[in-house]
Amino acid sequence: MPTNATVTTYVPRYATQSLFTNEQDEGTAYDITGSNSGTLPSGFVRAQTGNADLKWETSTQINLGVDFELFRNTVYGSFDWYEKETRDILTLTQPIATLGEGAQKWVNGGTIENAGVELVLGYEKWIETGLLEDELLVDINFNISSTENTVTTLPADVVNSFGGNGQDKTILGRSINSVYGYVADGIFQSQAEVEEHAVQSGAAPGRIRWQDLDANGVIDENDQDFFADTDPDFIYGMNFTFKYKAWDFNMFWQGVKGGQIRNNWRLFTDFTSLNIGSNYGARTLDAWTPENANSDVPALTLIDNNGEGRQSSFFWEEGTYLKLRNISVGYTPTLDFIERMGLNDARIYLQAQNLLTITPDGTLSEDPETPNEVFPVPRRITFGLEFSF
């Protein structure tokens, strides 16, 4: 939220050359003298509408937790539960176009309730293995957490700032991260299927079929609904640490179960009509044809008559993943070596980050951790020498 949200602001907008057309946008500049030369004087346009009644969000939170250590500190862990209510959330309105430019304003737009739990369990002990001459330190811990949120109140003037139609389908009672749009129902396989389906502009064999949610026989803006949210069911992590003499080893796994992500790469991998001239993905080689009817890639075309780039479940998939976030092995030289080298401390290690990602069958996203068309988290392998003097 900008610091000047309480006041109505106006800004000059001088002529700009569009990247997409040869026509120049004169903005608020005007050749009032008719000289057809020189610097044009500029007027002003409303940038935002102020709200003098704006106030800060307020939150009330309850936390309950317990930390524990058992069996002579061998088993340890913690359990936390919280419930939080945030009132007067700051929201930017999405007014109708007839209110003019700059009609949007920041308002205190409702209440959200959040609740969650977190559990940590660990085991740490020096153990005799029978295979090694010295004891091995084992430290294994596991954590899991789950949260949910619900929009509990929503003023009428901000209903359209969230998903929904602003009438019978609103985000009220749902997660703030709910997704609203059309529901894809496979691909038309034949002209007979097109004719049996509700009237759908752009329908043809090989095109995406949209569900007729209101069952009125016509696909239109009323056939939209909330079909996903980005909130995971839970997130978790597993950490393994072992130490033996001068050697240490660590492995950390981190995962997410559930939640939906938008895979915007499908705009490039599944269509030739939505990004004409771009480098298309290899999936386009498996596009639908009458001879390749089992494909989930729409038929290739250069004209998008079916509105297939619209917000729909076609681009959304489960965000579940498990990552080997970190693995490392290190060696600490002997104290005699450290002193002879004039050092206070030293360590040599080899480390790899994001080495492995495991996803469910059917996942198309290269990395569910980076949704939309963001590049995957890079894999890093590091060899390091640590010295302190």
Image (cartoon, rainbow, N blue to C red):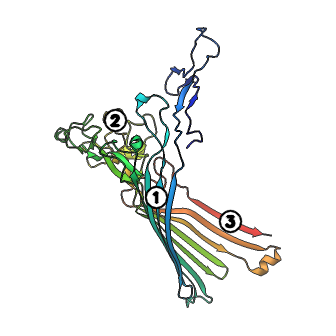
- Residue type at tag 2: Thr
Tell me which label, 1 or 3, sits earlier in the chain.
Answer: 1
The correct choice, above or below, for 232 with respect to 204 in the image is below
The correct choice, above or below, for 250 with respect to 160 in the image is below
- Residues at marks 2 and 1, CA–CA distance in whole angstroms: 49 Å
What percent of the width, then of the height, locates residue 15? Answer: 57, 22
Q: Is residue 292 visible?
A: no
Q: Is residue 315 left or right of residue 374?
A: left
Question: Residue 384's mark?
Answer: 3
Q: Quadrant of residue 386?
A: bottom right
- Residue type at tag 3: Gly
In front: mark 2 or mark 1? 1
Q: Quadrant of residue 201?
A: top left
Task: Say which element carries label 3.
Answer: strand
**Front-most of 234 and 298?**
234
Question: Residue 85's mark?
Answer: 1
Give the number of marks.
Answer: 3
The residue shown at (55%, 33%) is 8
The correct choice, above or below, for 313 with respect to 13 in the image is below
Tell me which label, 2 or 1, sits earlier in the chain.
Answer: 1
User: Which residue does the numbered mark 2 point to in the structure image?
Assistant: 301
Q: Is residue 216 left or right of residue 281?
A: left
What percent of the width, then of the height, locates residue 263? Answer: 42, 49
